[in-house]
Amino acid sequence: MLSDSGKWGGHSPVGNTTATNQTHLRRITLDVEVSDVPIAPEDGSEPEPSPWPSFDPGLFYDELVGPNGAPRPAAEALWRHFTELGPEALAERQEAADREMRAIGVTFTVYEGSTGVDRPWPFDIIPRVMPSDEWQLIESGLVQRLNALNLFIDDVYHEQRCVSSGIVPSELVSGSPNFRRECVGIDPPGGIWAHICGSDLIRDEDGIVYVLEDNLRVPSGVSYLLENRMVAKHVFPEMFRHYSIEPVDPYIGRLANMLASVSPSTGDPTMVVLTPGIYNSAYFEHAFLAQQLGIELVEGSDLVVLDDDCVYARTIDGLQQVDVIYRRIDDLYLDPEVFVPESLLGVPGLMRAWRSGRVALVNAPGAGIADDKKVYSYVPDIIRFFLDEEPILATVPTLRCSDEDSRHYVLSNLERLVVKPANESGGYGVLVGTQASTEELAAAAKQIETEPNKWVAQPVISLSTAPTLCDGEIAPRHVDLRPFILLGPEGAYVTRGGLTRVARNAGSLVVNSSQGGGSKDTWVVDTRGQTT
Amino acid sequence: MTQPQIDRDIQDQGESDAVGLPDPASIDHDHLGDDSPKEPKGPTMLLARMAEAVYWAGRYLERAECTARIVQAHTDTHVDMPVGQDVGWAPLLSIVGVDSEFAERYHQATEADEVDAAEEDVIEFLLHGTENPSSILGAVAAARENLRTARPVVPREAWEACNHLYLMCSDHLDEAKSRKGRVQWLRRVIAGCQQINGIMLGTMSRDEAMSFLLMGENLERADLTTRVLDVRSENLHSQRGDDPYEVVHWMSVLRSLAAYQPYRRAIPARPQGGSTLRFLLQDDRFPRAVSACLSETRSHLKGLARSENALDACADASMVVASAAVPHLTLGGLSEFLDEVQVALADIHDRIHETYFRPSFVGWQPDSVAS
């Protein structure tokens, strides 16, 4: 809703104010401007029939349907196909997709009280489509961002030039609960700390793409991205003839190469995925990745660190040394000798092994310093400082409540803002002002006044929508997008597309699957070579 | 670079002469980079925990399939028998070994040994009774959980097939209440288990994980064969002599173990005690005969390192089975003999367990391993 600096009551929002940056933003929204023009059939015949005549996204930007009710260029073939297919066939294919998801056992765990229940993964068969030229720009923006964040993390654990140069305040680093003093002075291979990043992208009503969040700790979701594609191929095999759709499968090979490239040993590395165990909500993904990578899925109790500072796995042939650990356990549970002593999930001595360089941890401990909400507000400056480039992707203007002027503005505009805890990643503790009760707003105000350091605020972004099957009807639902970025000493890779998450209820902005949200396959299509 | 420290570690603990210690060189990757001509082990490995999960997946799959066959054969036989001549439904409980659990669930008041077991109760209990640790649905669920754990080492399709089987079994439980629906349900279980086995045999590398799966299946199979013989023979003994239905009963035993047709082809005579027993215990060509299960287990053990202890137990069991004087057994002592076989089978299981799932290596603290 607040998308430019003029509406910020004198506060200068970060990230999207410079002329250069605006140019980038305009390039990203190229597709929007083109599709705003009503598509008049060249032969003067009637406009194409719509598969969903009553579909109306309202004021929101819809990913498939333009403002005049015509398909966006990248979605034209899809549009035609769905028109031919008709609503009944579409419903049948949705049922087929649901059956397949259930049969292949794609689940996620929802906690109801203390018991976890495995739920089938909710998948909406209508794909979200993005043109490849827009995607290329997003891709370069994501790589730029991850490069800068890694330089930032490495700097934080070494000279802290970003602090001495005044780019970020020192308390941002030393005062952060995500700063790990155990990591100071460590040199992971290639200086890379965050090897795997899942970034959350959103699009506002003007079609501008923002990075909402960088997840640098143990981002999840890539297995669902890959499974969604597999099911989509089974449900719409014919569509993959009409479209030139970028494949998502290469991710696994790239992930394997990246993991191998950080191995401290010279031979073929022994690599493992470290999971908290079968009761973790992302266990499906951990098992999926281990299976796809062809490596073992270990729990903390399967590993041991000996006096030689090497990590060994307990195999049927005895102990076997492990070189690379793709860990899906949070920092604080990794090693009871160093962090939470009661942790049964971790491996005693693991930090010792990592610090001595005998094992690689992916992502490295301490990487979480760069993905909290407060650091987020500095990312554009971090990009400029470390890369000497302008940010390619927009950042949502973020007010830090520790700053007195900002705090005053936030407190008097709470009902129009989103308030977030500064040091968390993900959706924990987020308050959406427009949807909060008076009591919730009052409680939030009190928290902000008591501990201003712990809160940041952002304008409410009106997420874009996509046509979604809801009880037999096609209706607009809000979506976000999580692509995955890999960064190793040998280079970077971005998934072509990402996991599109869908809010379940009309008007809701909550896309988390734990809150009943769904998902879509995301097609990055090359519209230039499109066949008809 | 790390080797001297490992060596010292071993000596410090005074375990350098313990059986089954790893050769430190075999876990040092620096050796893989040199020009040494020896076959490198490679970066693949099988976690002890995975081996155990795969082994139990094999056991539970086999248990589900065998139990389904046993219930099916028993139902078929029961239908054939004139009213009053049947053996009732209690023997099914004995075969699976859940008499006491059943009694506790359905007959808390009675203490009599002879359980008055109603068909629908027994069937419900065997198919999906929650108090029955070996119910068919419970076994499929346990196989599924173990395969879920072992997903990284089994073919994706095998896990999916098992997941599908579980969902199908639990979705269609109501249909299994009638005899007609029960037949369909049991057939689905058998076909589902066969499908999973087929996927493994057709697409899985003959690696260590495969060996543990097949050892689990064969040991469970041998165990169930002895249980069927034990319970059914006892029934037959008690009415031996002038029972006009003896042949029917022996045919039922054979059908319970999918052995009727192979038996007929091997021994084209009227089924009777001695030849049936010999076939099910000692015919190496029939994959459900106890001796064949032991041969299969032995061949997988031979491919594994440090298998001497388990191989010894396997050889002991084979000796017991091979040396059985079958004609005498039909006259008495069969039950004691089968007990002996079951003890020998349990011994093989124990040794596999201690050798591979809970081995005592340097740095290995069995207590810290969650079971």
Image (cartoon, coloured by chain):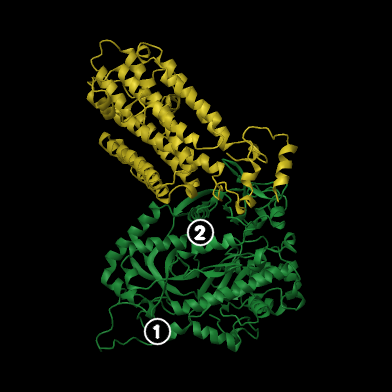
Chain colours: A green, B yellow
To which chain does the residue with label 1 belong? A
Q: Nearer the viewer, residue A19 or B12?
A: B12
Does dot 1 land on a helix, a strand or a loop? Answer: helix
> Where residue A514 is drawn, which disc sits there?
2
Residue at image x 63%, y 39%? Answer: B22
Tag count: 2
Considering only vertical position in the picture, is A264 above or below B58? below
User: Residue A531's spot in the image, x, y percent?
Assistant: 32, 77
Can residue A50 be seen here? The reply is yes
Q: Nearer the viewer, residue A6 or A425?
A: A425
Residue at image x 69%, y 57%? Answer: A357
Q: Quadrant of residue A199?
A: bottom right
Left/right placement of residue B298 relative to residue A88 reads right
> Where residue A35 is drawn, which disc sits there?
1
Image quadrant occupied by the C terminus of chain A: bottom left
Can residue A411 be seen here? The reply is no
CA separation in Å, label 1 and label 2: 34 Å
User: Residue A410's spot in the image, x, y percent?
Assistant: 64, 76
Q: Amino acid at mark 1?
A: Ser
To which chain does the residue with label 2 belong? A
Q: Nearer the viewer, residue B221 or B319?
A: B319
Does dot 2 land on a helix, a strand or a loop? Answer: helix
User: Residue B102's spot in the image, x, y percent?
Assistant: 42, 27
